């Protein structure tokens, strides 16, 4: 089945810096790759997603890139702000429709 | 448009009791997914349901756990004879369709087994 690896597990940046989180997946048939942000005590919130017919997608300060050949995708956050501090999860859809999640990256943005 | 709703938000049970977790999907969504999150870990898929049907329960423990999504009313995740290892956050997500549709998550139910 699908397996998703996520790195790094923790990331600390200064306000205004960029943050990059990387994920790899194992199932070449996977076609959909969402990113979720989870704040303490809350449910995951979708922040951006990408499908395999697209190599890059951007939404204001957030961008996602996908390399299907290498089976990896990355989240890029520019001009980070303290409110970006949270746990970020990548996911991929495997053989069925279930999301297979990475283990998460705790992002800390210090001002 | 209300998001995915889950209740209760917190649930405390003693070992051996039953836990019932409820999920109301977003309006217009007929697909429901349940995930479990253990402390310091990612979310693990448990079960996928459409109205009155279980589509995929490959992530569900074989014993004590069951799920339903009746024609009327919320989806229910039921855990019988809870044990301490069941303590976790349980999240429900819904989508308007199946494969590769965006899933929207509820706030979760945090189950603590004493």
Image (spheres, grey):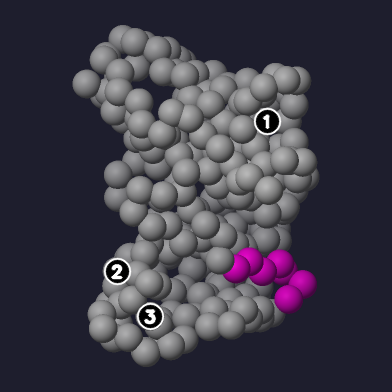
Between A20 and A25, the one lying in front of the other is: A20
Q: CA distance from mark 2 to mark 1?
A: 34 Å
| In the rendered image, residues at marks 2 and 1 fall on the same chain | no
Q: How many marks?
A: 3
- Label 2 packing within 10 angstroms: few (<14), some (14-19), many (20+): few
Q: Position of residue A13 (x, y in %)?
A: 30, 82
Q: Position of residue A76 (x, y in %)?
A: 50, 80
Mark drawn on residue B49:
1
| In the rendered image, residues at marks 2 and 3 fall on the same chain | yes
As drawn, is B19 to the left or to the right of A28? left
Name the quadrant containing residue B70: top right
Q: Is residue B102 magenta?
A: no
**Residue A50, above or below B34:** below
Task: Point out the stretch of residues depicted in magenta.
Answer: A48-54
As drawn, is A26 to the left or to the right of A97? left
Between B98 and A24, the one lying in front of the other is: B98
* Chain letter of disc 3 in the image: A
Report the residue at 63% width, 25% height from top.
Answer: B74
Name the quadrant containing residue A47: bottom right
Mark drawn on residue A81:
3
**Residue B104, above or below A70:** above
**Which of the two labelled residues, at mark 2 and mark 3, occupies the earlier sequence position?**
2
Q: Position of residue A2 (x, y in %)?
A: 57, 52
Quadrant of the rendering where the C terminus of chain A is positioned: bottom left
Between B61 and B106, the one lying in front of the other is: B106
Residue on which the image places disc 2: A10
């Amino acid at each position: 089945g699908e397996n998703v690896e996520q790195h790094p597990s923790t990331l600390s940046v200064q306000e205004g810096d960029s943050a990059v989180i990387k994920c790899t997946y194992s199932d070449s048939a996977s076609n959909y790759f969402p990113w979720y942000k989870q704040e303490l005590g809350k449910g995951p919130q979708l922040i951006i997603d990408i499908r395999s017919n697209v190599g890059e997608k951007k939404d204001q300060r957030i961008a996602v890139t996908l390399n299907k050949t290498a089976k990896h995708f990355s989240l890029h956050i520019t001009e980070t702000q303290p409110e970006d501090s949270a746990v970020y999860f990548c996911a991929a859809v495997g053989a069925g429709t279930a999301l297979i999640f990475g283990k998460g990256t705790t992002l800390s943005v210090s001002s | 448009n209300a998001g995915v709703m889950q209740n209760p938000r917190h649930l405390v049970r003693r070992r051996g009791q039953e836990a019932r977790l409820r999920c109301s999907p977003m309006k217009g969504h007929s697909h429901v997914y349940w995930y479990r999150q253990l402390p310091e870990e990612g979310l693990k898929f448990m079960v996928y349901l459409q109205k009155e049907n279980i589509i995929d329960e490959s992530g569900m423990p074989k014993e004590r756990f069951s799920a339903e999504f009746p024609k009327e009313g919320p989806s229910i995740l039921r855990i019988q004879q809870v044990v301490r290892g069941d303590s976790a956050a349980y999240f429900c997500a819904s989508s308007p369709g199946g494969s590769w549709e965006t899933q929207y998550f509820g706030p979760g139910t945090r189950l603590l087994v004493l």
